[in-house]
C-alpha cells in the first residue's frame, strides 16, 4: 500500500491541511495552535449531586501560522478562494498531522478555512495566520510527545 501523505523535513513532521501538504516556512513561534472543546460538562442538582455528561463536541479550532515568505500561503489562499466560489461549504478537505516518532497523531476528514490572514501594505509584512476548523471525533487524535519546539 502506498503512502498517501507527503513527508517533509520541517521539524520532522508531516502536516496536510485542507488537503494541502505543508512544507514551507512555518511560523517558528507557533506553527499549529489547537483549541479543543471540553470533553465533559458537569450538571449540579439542587441536592448537590454532580452529574458528569459527555459533551460530544467535536469542533476543534486550529490556527496555522507561516513566515511571510512561505509558498504554502499561496496554496491555502487558493483553497480558500475555491471554497468561497464553490459555495455551500463544498471546500472541505482533510487534515493530518504526525510528529517524527508518531507519538502525536491528528486526523480529520473534515477541515476548512474559516478566515484568511490579515495583512498590511506599506509596512513589513509579518507572519500570516489562517484560522481553520476541523471535526475531530473521539479516537481520531492522540496528543503525546511532540517534536515541534
Image: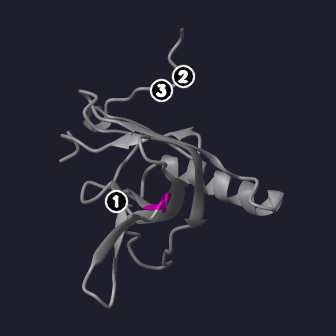
Mark 1 to mark 3 CA distance (whole Å): 21 Å
Q: Earlier in the sequence, mark 1 or mark 3?
A: 3
Q: Callout 3: 10 Å neighbours few (<14), some, many (20+)?
A: few
Which residue is drawn at the image coordinates 24% and 59% (left, top)? Answer: 29
- What are the residue bounds of the magenta stretch? 56-61
Residue 33 image label: 1
Instruction: State the SS at label 1.
Output: strand
Mark 1 to mark 2 CA distance (whole Å): 24 Å
Which residue is drawn at the image coordinates 58% and 66% (left, top)? Answer: 114
Q: Which residue bears the numbered disc 3? A: 6
Q: Position of residue 49 (x, y in %)?
A: 27, 79
**Can residue 38 be seen at all in this image of the molecule?**
no
Work out whether residue 142 or residue 97 is closer to the camera in this orientation and state it. Answer: 142
Q: Position of residue 116 (x, y in %)?
A: 56, 67
- The reply to whether callout 1 and callout 3 are in contact (CB within 8 Å) is no
Q: Position of residue 7 (x, y in %)?
A: 41, 26
Q: Callout 1: 10 Å neighbours few (<14), some, many (20+)?
A: few
Q: Which residue bears the numbered disc 2? A: 4
Occupied quadrant, residue 144:
top left
In the displayed image of the protein, which residue is found farthest to the top? 1
Q: Callout 2: 10 Å neighbours few (<14), some, many (20+)?
A: few
Residue 107 image label: none
Q: Mark 1 against mark 3, which lies toward the viewer? A: 1
**Count of residue discs:** 3
Work out whether residue 99 or residue 121 is closer to the camera in this orientation and state it. Answer: 99
- The reply to whether callout 2 and callout 3 are in contact (CB within 8 Å) is no
Q: Earlier in the sequence, mark 1 or mark 2?
A: 2
**Residue 94 magenta-drawn?**
no
Amino acid at each position: 500500500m502506498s503512502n498517501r501523505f507527503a513527508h517533509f523535513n520541517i521539524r520532522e513532521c508531516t502536516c496536510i491541511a485542507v488537503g494541502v501538504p505543508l512544507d514551507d516556512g512555518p511560523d517558528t513561534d507557533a506553527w499549529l495552535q489547537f483549541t479543543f472543546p471540553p470533553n465533559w460538562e458537569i450538571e449540579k442538582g439542587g441536592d448537590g449531586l454532580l452529574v458528569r455528561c459527555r459533551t460530544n463536541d467535536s469542533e476543534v479550532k486550529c490556527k496555522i501560522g507561516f513566515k511571510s515568505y512561505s509558498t504554502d500561503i499561496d496554496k491555502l489562499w487558493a483553497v480558500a478562494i475555491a471554497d468561497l466560489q464553490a459555495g455551500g461549504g463544498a471546500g472541505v478537505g482533510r487534515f493530518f498531522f504526525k510528529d517524527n516518532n508518531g507519538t502525536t497523531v491528528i486526523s480529520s476528514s473534515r477541515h476548512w478555512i474559516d478566515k484568511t490572514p490579515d495583512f498590511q501594505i506599506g509596512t513589513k509584512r509579518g507572519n500570516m495566520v489562517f484560522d481553520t476548523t476541523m471535526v475531530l471525533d473521539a479516537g481520531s487524535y492522540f496528543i503525546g510527545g511532540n517534536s515541534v519546539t
